[in-house]
Amino acid sequence: MTMLKAAGLSIRFGGVAAVDGVSLAVPEGELCALIGPNGAGKTTLFALLSGFLAPQSGAVEFDGRTVTGMKPHAICALGLARTFQIVQPFAAQSVRENIAVGAHLRLRSRRDALAFADEVARRVGLAGELDKPASALTIAGRKRLELARALATRPKLLLLDEVLAGLNPQEIDAVVPVVRAIRDSGVTVLMIEHVMRAVMSLADRVLVLAGGRLIAEGPPAAIAADPRVVEAYLGQGTAARLARSGGAP
């Protein structure tokens, strides 16, 4: 079953096509990575998929239902949640209270929401931080909190926008199993990521965006060797130069 489907999504800002005719499908249960150079349109595409921006053309289907033009909170209530690249928790509230904000989408009782926040915190490695103010968390802790707040909405599909950005190698190694466990629990995941070793480890399939267009998709190993992807990241003619030199930059 296809959990998420986009057909011909486009949006322009002034004369620039930020997303240009993108079509994609994410099957239920898959962990799919969306990669591409800076400015490729990845976060804009996430905004279109999740309702934060309305496409100028094209359509989005989630779980068999057209959601184009719906408000973000309504799409989230259907089961599509997202994180944000720039993490902005409620700094004066505790970690538990921050997570409970997401839990309130499904749970009216304050007591139930706080109890569920504890459960979600354990899943993302924040069980020991629940009573701290969010402002006291490290960057890695804030990334986990952003993940927890989205997870607390009980999503069917989770859009992760650079959840590993700004982390050191040890912190990345600690978060990768958390993301994998979310997928293994039955949540479909589409993640924007620049940390390629994490992409290679986690992704079932990789989508590559460049200049607002989807230029390649496939298994991680095939994408890493695709000349179109090499050129998108390293510039025109790079793939040919690498081939002539036997693969050395």
Image (cartoon, rainbow, N blue to C red):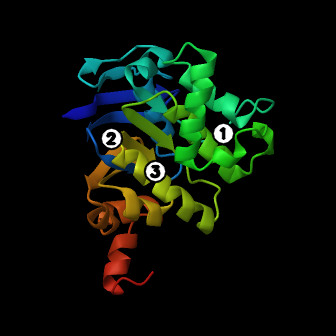
Q: Earlier in the sequence, mark 3 or mark 2?
A: 3
Instruction: Give the residue displayed 50% in from the left and 17% down from the top.
Output: 73
Q: Is residue 142 above or below residue 97?
A: below
For this view, does 87 lie left or right of residue 75?
right
Q: Is residue 71 above or below residue 31?
A: above
Nearer to us of marks 3 and 2 is 2
Instruction: Give the residue displayed 56% in from the left and 54% down from the top.
Output: 164
Element type at mark 2: loop
Q: Which residue is mark 3?
A: 179
What is the number of the mark on residue 87? 1
Nearer to us of marks 3 and 1 is 3
Element type at mark 3: helix
Please state which amino acid type lies under the numbered disc 1.
Val
Please state which amino acid type lies under the numbered disc 3.
Val
> Whole-Å distance between the Cαs marked 2 and 1?
25 Å
Viewer-proximal residue, 35 or 76? 76
> Whole-Å distance between the Cαs marked 3 and 2?
12 Å
Viewer-proximal residue, 57 or 110? 110
Q: Is residue 131 above or below residue 202?
A: above
Q: Which quadrant of the rendered structure holds the C terminus?
A: bottom left
Q: Position of residue 101 (x, y in %)?
A: 62, 24
> Whole-Å distance between the Cαs marked 3 and 1?
17 Å
Q: Is residue 91 something one can see in this rendering?
A: yes
Q: Residue furthest left?
A: 1
Q: Which residue is mark 2?
A: 186
Q: Earlier in the sequence, mark 3 or mark 1?
A: 1
Using the rendered view, name the quadrant where residue 173 is placed.
bottom right
Nearer to us of marks 2 and 1 is 2
